[in-house]
Image (tube, rainbow, N blue to C red):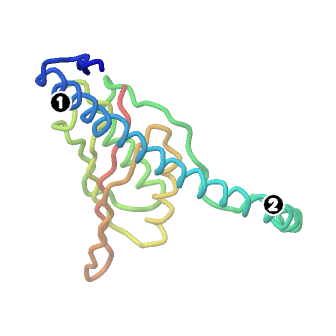
Amino acid sequence: MVEYKPIIRNKRYVGALILTITSMILFVLVPDYLKNRKLDAKVKTLTQTQDIQIKLRPLYDQISLKADFEKLPGLSVPKKGWFNRSEIRNIPRIFKYLAQKNKLKCLQSRPDVDTLIGNSKIMLISIVLKGEFERFRDFLFDITDLDYLDSMEEIKFVSEQTDKKYTLKIWIAIN
């Protein structure tokens, strides 16, 4: 009878080989398997959602045909423009003119020069007005027509004995 001779005689090599194979299974194959299970569940959810949308599409088409999509009245979106950096000194005059146009008294129109530090593209302006609310509303509509208006940060109403006082903080785009 022939005596059995193992292929690998060193038990350390066999142990290292078994440890490598086990670690590859644990650290490569098992995470991939779990990831594939999650992706399969996600695909199943998306397929169910798609089936629902396919079933509801004819109903959506009927409703959208019956709906009247007319343009609703509202504020027009102004074109995006820039205020020239060299003309910043004219900002108080511009807002005083808009206030006088709407029969308001402009108590203060002051650019915040600290917001121009570096290459800032926007600048904060603080405006204080006094007058009737209807006139102030018209003033706000006139401000929205300015193409360099970036956003309005704050509007405060302060009630006084005779008239109301309005404080605005707005940001304008600077080039």
Q: Which amino acid, mark 1?
A: Ile
Viewer-proximal residue among 45 and 105: 45
**Side of 83 relative to 156 (left or right):** right
Residue drawn at (61%, 54%), measured in percent from left and top? Answer: 46
Q: Is residue 153 left or right of residue 40?
A: left
Where residue 2 appears, as percent x and y from the top left, is 29, 18
Nearest to the observer: residue 61 or residue 30: 30
* Residue 130 in the image, given as x and y percentages of width and height: 32, 66
Which element carries disc 2, helix, strand or loop? helix
Q: Are marks 1 and 2 in contact (CB under 8 Å)?
A: no
| Circle 2 residue | 57
Q: Which residue is mark 1?
A: 117
Classify residue 13 by image quadrant: top left
Q: Position of residue 81 (x, y in %)?
A: 48, 32
Mark 2, residues whose alpha carbon is within 10 Å: few (<14), some, or many (≥20)?
few
Q: State how far apart marks 1 and 2 are (Cα).
A: 54 Å
| Closer-to-camera residue (132/34) | 34
Expressed as whole percent of the image width and height from the top left, the position of residue 143 reads 46, 50
Image quadrant holding the C terminus, namely top left
Residue shown at the point (32%, 36%) measured from the top left? 25
> Circle 1: is it few (<14), some (14-19), or many (20+) Cα within 10 Å?
few
Q: Is residue 69 left or right of residue 9?
A: right
Horizontal side of 38 relative to 131 (left or right) equals right
Q: Residue at x 88, y 66 (%)?
A: 62
Q: Count the numbered circles shown.
A: 2
